[in-house]
Image (cartoon, rainbow, N blue to C red):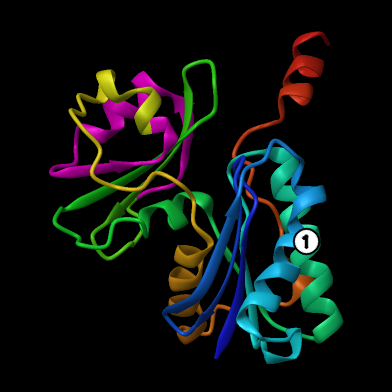
């Protein structure tokens, strides 16, 4: 089964087509344009370069956050439009889950995905070596997250939040890719598909974990 995969939760737009676990082609772009400008042209190029058509696709998957509020909305609305027009099932994958799949050798007990949320805040997902979530996602100060991580051993960190806070996390060097890849969304999505965890397009919802900056400012100012 061929899967169309979309990631827009970071500043990089990533699209790919996979067949089961195998990635046929992934395209990534970060050209300082908005995802609303780049996403559909990138998808068009993906189909052109693979000589495939939308009618070849059996499943659509995307990341739903946490990450860029605007990017997430663009990705979800685009995937909804594609899935609804073709009557395709969808799979939602958290950005933190997709990052965990960057770690393929599993030479660890714990995978910690960290996305930078600015102002010392991070989004955090803690997984075992089989990508099972060990506790609820966190959206908190990095120092609070570090306290939570103290109960875990043999941790591999991944994500731009780990890069920003590498000194606090005592990371000497990074051996892994810290970009959210649509090809890894595909791996997670296919696992969920095999477990019958598909959705209809109308049930696709963003995972924000915290309020937007505008909402926080409004709340602060009363």
The quarter of the picture where residue 17 lies is: bottom right
Q: Residue at x 49, y 51 (%)?
A: 180
Q: Magenta segment: does it hold 47?
A: no
User: Residue 150: x, y in percent?
Assistant: 20, 32
Q: Secondary structure at mark 1?
A: helix
Q: Is residue 104 visible?
A: yes
Q: Residue at x 75, y 70 (%)?
A: 44
**In the image, is 21 to the left or to the right of 52?**
left
User: Residue 198: x, y in percent?
Assistant: 60, 79
Location of the C terminus (image quadrant): top right
Report the magenta residues as a range: 135-161
User: Residue 162: x, y in percent?
Assistant: 35, 32
Q: Is residue 199 visible?
A: no
197 over 101 or under it: above or below: below
The local crowd at label 1, few if under 14, some if 14 to 19, many if 20 or more residues have their Cα within 10 Å, is few
87 over 80 or under it: above or below: below
In the image, farthest residue toward the top: 221
Location of the N terminus (image quadrant): bottom right
**In the image, is 79 to the left or to the right of 65?**
right
Q: Which residue is mark 1?
A: 41
Q: Residue at x 69, y 77 (%)?
A: 47
């Amino acid at each position: 089964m061929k899967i169309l995969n979309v990631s827009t939760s970071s500043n990089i737009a990533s699209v790919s087509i996979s067949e089961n676990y195998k990635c046929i082609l992934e395209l990534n772009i970060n050209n300082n344009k908005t995802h609303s400008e780049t996403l559909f042209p990138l998808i068009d190029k993906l189909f052109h370069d693979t000589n495939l058509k939308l009618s070849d696709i059996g499943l659509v998957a995307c990341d739903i956050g946490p990450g860029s509020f605007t990017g997430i909305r663009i990705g979800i609305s685009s995937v909804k439009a594609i899935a609804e027009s073709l009557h395709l099932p969808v799979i939602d994958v958290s950005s933190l889950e997709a990052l965990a799949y960057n770690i393929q050798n599993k030479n660890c007990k714990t995978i910690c995905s960290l996305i930078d949320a600015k102002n010392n805040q991070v989004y955090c997902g803690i997984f075992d070596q089989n990508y099972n979530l060990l506790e609820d996602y966190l959206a908190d100060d990095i120092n609070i997250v570090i306290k939570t991580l103290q109960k875990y051993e043999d941790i591999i960190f991944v994500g731009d939040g780990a890069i920003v806070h590498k000194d606090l996390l005592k990371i000497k060097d990074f051996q892994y890719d810290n970009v959210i890849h649509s090809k890894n969304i595909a791996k997670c999505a296919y696992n969920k598909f095999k477990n019958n965890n598909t959705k209809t397009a109308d049930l696709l919802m963003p995972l924000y974990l915290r309020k937007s900056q505008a909402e926080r400012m409004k709340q602060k100012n009363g």
